[in-house]
Amino acid sequence: MKKLLSLILVAMLILSLAAPAMAEAPKYKIAILTGTTSQGEEEYRAAENLKAQYPDMVITDTYPDAFSSEVETTIGKLMQFAADPEVKAIIMCQAVMGATAAFTQIRQDRPDILLLAGVPAEDPADIGGAADVVMGVDEINGGAQIVETAQEWGAEVLVHYSFARHMGYETIVARFNIMKAACEDAGIEFVPRDAPDPTAEGGPTVSQAFILEDVPKVMAEYAGKKVAFFTTNCGMQEALQTAVLKEENALYPLPCCPSPFHGFPASLGLAVNEEDWGDINAYLEKMAVELGKYNAVDRVSTWAAPVNMSMILGGFEYAKDYIENGGEKLDQAKLQQYLSDAAGAQAQLTPYEDDNGNVVENYFMVLFDNVDFNEYVK
């Protein structure tokens, strides 16, 4: 009897010790859908890190690399998230084609779920009507920033690489028009150049090969002139950076999704270690050393804040706050604070406004200051 009583007491003690841990277990999940590392490593790694930090709360998945031709697969993955009753928020970055359709259906079936879209590929009014919060790179003011930086560096030509699919996106077209007008005002020749779509046959490899071959041709065509280059596609950034670094008069004002981790780890041969994600300044100093080897400290820039990663990490904290504390699904002040905290830099948020003056109140254009790598040279 005494032995049985002892066993009961031990069992009660174990249960009492386990109770706090059981009480602290999350009663909800946050789902995150990103691209693979070939289309956007920054957001993939951010989601991966959150999953490691919150294994019982965070669930992740990736949309296909050929997302433009596999829209139904993307929609299916989002719908699968929503089918789990414990999922209370979904974050998608980049919000490629299929996001609007899936979010519209999810909103009808599960109005309780908070829906966040980062770097959307669909029209602002459409994705704004489907998601609760939309975060886009401020391509409009970013376009002006690109030309301003190129002008400061003495550029005489600015080459804009894109393709038909991207030039169907309203925000990309708006940035294109801003860049074209700003170049005209600055006396810089603006040169649109068609590149292969990385989601078409041949994939990113064909697009990257084109960039690597075309940049030297452009530099030969404009021999003796300083030429700035920009491409609208994430998968082309590494190739463009690599090509620019090899040409002494080639300039690279900004990636399409500005970040120290967007293409640069590969183009500079500079691995991203675990500590680098938490110490951006230290990584920028490493970048400055590598850029110095190419005499490129004065002709390459990015944002100190990794914007796509900030959308994942800041969006996660925003969702967590909403789920745990309630409030409005749309809170610009909270969103700005969480994005700034995640980036370690002040985020500027501007509601999107189209050419006709129509404002999409829940679609925020995110802007950070760009980097002068001279400030990171030791």
Image (cartoon, rainbow, N blue to C red):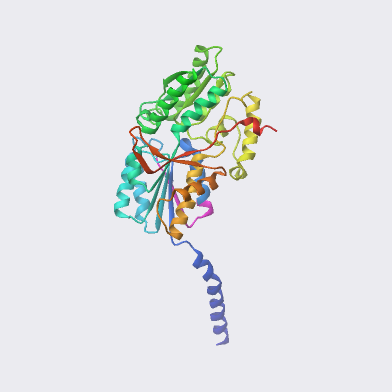
x%, y% of residue 106? 32, 51
x%, y% of residue 134? 40, 44
Drawn side of residue 186 relative to residue 296, left or right? left
Could you say which is closer to the camera, residue 294 or residue 346?
Answer: 346
Q: Residue at x 56, y 42 (%)?
A: 345
Drawn side of residue 94 relative to residue 304, left or right? left
Q: For the C terminus, give its image quadrant.
A: top right
x%, y% of residue 316? 47, 50
x%, y% of residue 100? 33, 43
Residue 243 in view:
no
Question: Which quarter of the picture shows residue 181?
Answer: top left
Residue 301 in view:
yes
Q: For the N terminus, give its image quadrant.
A: bottom right
Q: Residue at x 48, y 44 (%)?
A: 311
Drawn side of residue 52 relative to residue 375, left or right? left
Q: Is residue 51 above or below residue 177?
A: below
- Magenta segment range? 51-63
Q: Residue at x 31, y 47 (%)?
A: 104
